[in-house]
Amino acid sequence: MSLANARVADIHAHVVLEETFGATGGYGPELTEEDGIPVFRIGSYELRGVQYRGSAFMDPDVRIAAMDRIGIDWQLLSPNPLTYFHFIPTEGAVAFCCRHNDALSAMIARYPDRLGGATALPMQDIPAAIAELRRAVTELGLKAAYIGTDMPHGLDDPCMDPFYEAICELDVPLFIHPAPAGIDGPAANPALSKYELDIMLGFTMQESIAVATLLFGGVLHRHPALDICISHGGGAIALVWGRLEHAAHKRIWVPEHLKPDGAFAEQLGRLWYDIHMHDDRAVELLVERVGTDRLVYGTNFAGWDAPEKFRMPTIDAPLADNARRLLRG
């Protein structure tokens, strides 16, 4: 089994790598235990109670066994969102990303027909990010770039254009997935600190903002060969797209290429979306907005919200074929 003949290809599966611990110095990451409870530390942020060691996150043998049990043929492994390190000093971020990508490549080499990898990148320094992207793709064989929604500059900032050009030149997709705000960057709204709303609602907000920024900022217009996949169905974009499209016709700051009838919807359909959304009706609304050609299957494998058994949403779409097109597989 490989991506080329996989029936179920999962493109949303994070990984934690022992070799990266301490790579940034004081920012970690660090995995310890307190009173028998695992503690994963990134800077001053602590995640308690997640069993990384001995789990599918860190042990590829456990991962493959779980994939077989659930019915997943192939997975794309990506950085843990807690460890983007997009706001720390560049030197530490570069050290982490290099170690991460080397270790990820080595892990995948144990199961080359079942696993692929996406790069960690130091996005606070675009030349450094481009250099590591080139190395990871051309020397390590990783299949995609992977970044957070937030960094010191916006997704539409002109400084990002050389990065997008490098993505297109290397002919790989770019995946964008949020991290809880405030880990190594600006603090979130205090209301998001309760009830894990930073994950359950904050992620949705960040994904929706990312989609709107890419479209209104003209990123896809400037880079027509660029393939970007947004996690969790693009946040709430299927719900609010009508309001955004209305703005495209009414607001004076909207770029000219978005103003003609149908232009906003066409650009929205240029993005890719993983459908890890927990609600068939939400998926159906997304299909109504953007069709099925750019939908891919994802699980957040081994995470708190991952499915316990394989269940494909009830849509008529060849999701594994879509994943092969997205990943050039």
Image (cartoon, rainbow, N blue to C red):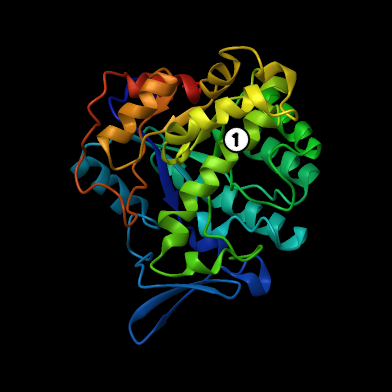
Q: Determine the residue located farthest toward the bottom in the rendered image.
A: 35
Q: Amino acid at mark 1?
A: Ala
Residue 259 visible, this orientation: yes
Whole-percent x, y for residue 292 in the image: 38, 19
Q: Quadrant location of the N terminus?
A: top left
Q: Is residue 69 above or below residue 144?
A: below
Q: Is residue 53 left or right of residue 229?
A: left
Picture residue at 29% right of the left edge, 45% below the top: 64
Picture residue at 22% right of the left edge, 41% below the top: 68
Q: Is residue 157 above or below residue 36?
A: above
Q: Quadrant of residue 119?
A: top right
Whole-percent x, y for residue 268 in the image: 54, 24
Closer to us: 186 or 305: 186
Q: Is residue 61 left or right of residue 110?
A: left
Picture residue at 37% right of the left edge, 66% below the top: 53
Return the residue at label 1.
212
Q: Quadrant of residue 130?
A: top right
Closer to us: 47 or 71: 47
Picture residue at 77% right of the left edge, 44% below the top: 126
Closer to us: 63 or 320: 320
Q: Is residue 302 left or right of residue 226?
A: left
Crowding near the residue tagged with mark 1, few <14, some 14–19, many ≥20 C-alpha atoms within 10 Å? some
Q: Secondary structure at mark 1?
A: helix
Whole-percent x, y for residue 210 in the image: 59, 40
Q: Determine the residue located farthest toward the front in the rendered image.
A: 250
Q: Quadrant of residue 112?
A: top left
